[in-house]
Image (tube, rainbow, N blue to C red):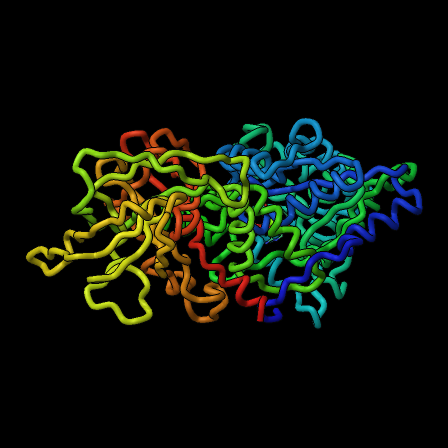
Amino acid sequence: MSKTEEVSTPAPKGNFIHQEIEKDLKEGKNGGAVLTRFPPEPNGYLHIGHAKSICLNFGIAEKYNGGCNLRFDDTNPTKEEVEYVESIKQDVRWLGFEWEGQEKYASDYFDQLFEWAVKLIKNGKAYVDDQSAEAIAAQKGTPTEPGVESEFRNRSVEENLDLFMRMRNGEFKEGERVLRAKIDMASPNMHMRDPIMYRIIHKSHHRTGNKWCIYPMYDFTHGQSDFIEGITHSICTLEFEVHRPLYNWFLDQILEGEPEPERRPRQIEFARLNLNYTVMSKRRLLELVQKGIVNGWDDPRMPTISGLRRRGYTPASIRMFAERVGVAKRDNIIDVALLEHCVREDLNKRAPRVNAVIDPVKLVLINYPEDKVEWMEAVNNPEDESQGTRQIPFTRELYIERNDFMENPPKKFFRLGPGREVRLKNGYIIKCEDYKKNENGEVEEIYCTYDPETRSGNDTTGKKVKGTLHWVSASHSLPAEVRLYDRLFMDEDPAGHKDKDFKEFLNPDSLNILTNCRVEPSLKDVKALDFFQFQRLGYFCVDPDSTPGHLVFNRTVPLKDTWAKMTKK
Ligand code: ATP
Ligand code: MG
């Protein structure tokens, strides 16, 4: 893999897959139709890599006025669950896409696949092998050495048919027999060395129940499922390039003696998305969930779509990211800072600005009347006038961030310190007169005077100060819990170390829960996933755990943009 790549804006002509599709359209292939599919195996939740594939496939359908199927490649009943099917449907829809007709399942094609397997047996193109999986693997050879033919390879058609029916009827135990394609044990392509087509699994399937105890292998299912659905362009990741001759071989066999079909899927491969500072294999993500290292598939630290959603990522930001990483033919690693940049760009335009103090210290305006409340007008979003303004309460006792005050500030510290002046945003200019510490030596209260002539929007003094602080009213603000997240891993490629487990690189400080926060009263009725900019602190969204009596916010990203800095250089 190349090292972290700069992101190029996609060429106006579209990516190389678009160009191939346009060529096919120009040549009048498929009667001008374009039908793609997104084919997840329901054995885990979708992640950001899947999002790229979803955006690509559904994006092609939109661009060429075609369609995109959602098909569950559910050939392995040992790992698949209905929970995953439901989460996948939810995630695709949340990203803003709708599939063609009903969702499809490879398991709906089990009867047809079985018939085709029988056809191959009858044509002498498949045989039942009594060897164990280990023995078969040992005979596979290496890329430079041919494999060894099984002693069962030359069984008669009758015997093969009889054994295959008995496999289906449940007469054998798991692992006792498999059905293999009869291709070429000396092929330079290992996938062509008599690959397994069917294996015995005595387990009920989430859709077909106990109807089957033999299940087709992914490789005997995927290409034919595309063919059955009339998919014109089968877009997949690079590792499937070497499977392409096998898919074509299977199609040739099942079409043997049949008229040439109107459509035959054309497979085009692209490089999968890799992101630094995370892991993306479903096996590893499942391990994090099962071992309780994260709080479920939708933990906001996970690279899953459900995790990103809970973290506050918007569908638009993920689509923007997929567009910007583009489509490559060679593997590369994308910097997670680009993903963060995309969500900032989207939320900057859309997120209402509000005030929250996440590490509060009390500030008392000693010359401000005790019971007075002034409702100050505050702009909701300077990037979007249509979001209007709201009123925020200003009172004698306020909270500010603890780190906005220093007892002995250096010269360059433009915030608050003894004798110093700052502006309170949407408030007044204040001056620090004194402060009090508790028995632990922590600052407990800060005493200031305010200048009544400096009210924001109505300042007659022309006074200039260097710092502007955010604040909330002590009496009117609401208590809140705020969850701050950092990267889940401290290493750029946690799964890339030969002799180290990826879990050794977990970041012990990836979650920091602050329970003492205060937010402005306008946030009283927020709903799960509502998003905001907490001024000076970052973008935040309402966690689904939040209730009116116990507000909970997740930080999506801080305001500082390392990606923008990197690319400006
Ligand atoms: P598994 O390890 O279980 O095979 P998978 O990530 O390949 O996992 P699938 O459910 O088979 O998962 O993937 C569905 C689709 O998403 C496939 O077309 C696959 O090519 C695509 N896809 C998976 N991971 C990525 C990725 N990182 N980048 C782009 N596309 C991906
Ligand atoms: Mg896969």
Q: Is residue 336 left or right of residue 442?
A: right
Residue at image coords 69%, 58%: 9
The x, y position of residue 243, in whole percent, is: 72, 55
Q: Is residue 312 left or right of residue 272?
A: left
Q: Is residue 125 left or right of residue 6?
A: right
State how many labels appear: 0
Residue at image coords 42%, 41%: 541
Of residues 476 and 513, the one drawn nearer to the viewer in this rendering: 476
Task: Place residue 67 in its image quadrant.
Answer: top right
Q: Is residue 413 left or right of residue 270?
A: left
Q: Quadrant of the C terminus?
A: bottom right
* Farthest residue, direction left: 439
Q: Is residue 296 visible?
A: no
Q: Quadrant of the N terminus?
A: bottom right
Q: Is residue 109 above or below residue 539?
A: above
* Farthest residue, direction front: 460
Task: Place residue 141 in its image quadrant.
Answer: bottom right
Q: Is residue 296 above or below residue 245?
A: above
Q: Is residue 360 visible?
A: yes
Task: Place residue 477 in its image quadrant.
Answer: top left
Residue at image coords 60%, 32%: 212
Of residues 50 and 342, the one drawn nearer to the viewer in this rendering: 342
The x, y position of residue 379, in whole percent, is: 45, 40
Of residues 75 and 359, the one drawn nearer to the viewer in this rendering: 359
The x, y position of residue 162, in whole percent, is: 70, 37
Residue at image coords 49%, 59%: 561
The x, y position of residue 489, in whole percent, is: 41, 61
Q: Is residue 143 above or below residue 305?
A: below
Q: Is residue 469 above or below residue 114?
A: below
Of residues 475 and 300, the one drawn nearer to the viewer in this rendering: 475
